[in-house]
Amino acid sequence: MLEYIIIMVYNPTKILIIGRKLLKNIDVFDRKILRIIQKNGRISNSDLADEVGLSTSACHRRLQRLFDDSIIREVVALVSEKAIKLNLTVFVEIKLLRQVDEVLEEFERAVCLIPEVLECNLMAGSADYLLKVVVGDAEDFERIHRKYLSRLPNVSNMMSSFSLRKVYKTTALPI
């Protein structure tokens, strides 16, 4: 997967995306496509072209290029947590015994196998990792903690914080 650095240039209608192996111009039409598709992944090409102000064939070519260049990685369905009774979000701070490559890699391989972990972020600060875990309730979290979290390798300390309420959430990046 390519990593990108986003740089705003003097001309506000263009963003340069500089990757390890490629340099692509993202113009005002691409930015419009990205903003729209992030909020409505099921929009038809015809409707997308109308909203962006392009012909359907030009819109389709641009959209395909955004996929081909891995600027758009995938289109997914966002499932309601409450509808499937995953009502509790828990943030778990993890401190490891040591911070050497082998320890970090072993931990990362193990944590990726836990289905309830939606995110695992390597942190700077007091914790080495921050996990976002979704569960049905506190009893469910206790089960996940006993079955998975307490068995993660090389953990020296773990602190969990329960979310009382989700104030704001978006999946759309600010483009």
Image: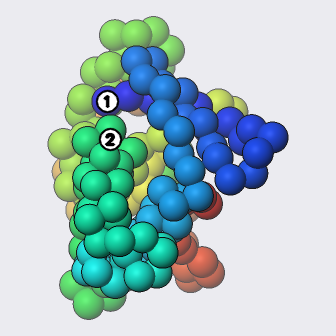
Residue 34 on image: x %, y %: 46, 62
Where disc 2 sits, the SS reads loop
Q: Residues within 10 Å of mark 1 (few under 14, many from 20)?
A: few
Looking at the image, is 119 positioned above or below residue 7? Answer: below
- Disc 1 marks which amino acid? Met
- Sequence-wise, the earlier of marks 2 and 1 is 1
In the image, farthest residue toward the right = 10
Residue 44 on image: x %, y %: 25, 80
Q: Which mark is residue 145?
A: none
Q: Residue at x 48, y 75 (%)?
A: 53
Residue linked to disc 2: 70
Where disc 1 sits, the SS reads loop
Residue 36 on image: x %, y %: 46, 73
Q: Which mark is residue 1?
A: 1
Q: Nearer the viewer, mark 2 or mark 1?
A: 2
Looking at the image, is 155 positioned above or below residue 164? Answer: above
Q: Residue at x 23, y 33 (%)?
A: 110
Q: Residue at x 39, y 45 (%)?
A: 71
Looking at the image, is 157 positioned above or below residue 37? Answer: above
Taking the image as drawn, is residue 106 in sight?
Answer: yes
Residue 76 on image: x %, y %: 25, 66
Q: Are marks 2 and 1 in contact (CB under 8 Å)?
A: yes
- Disc 2 marks which amino acid? Ser
In the image, farthest residue toward the bottom = 83
Looking at the picture, tell me which residue is in the foreground, 101 or 144: 101
Residue 88's image quarter?
bottom left
Looking at the image, is 30 positioned above or below residue 33? Answer: above
Q: Residue at x 44, y 49 (%)?
A: 131
Looking at the picture, tell me which residue is in the foreground, 73 or 36: 36
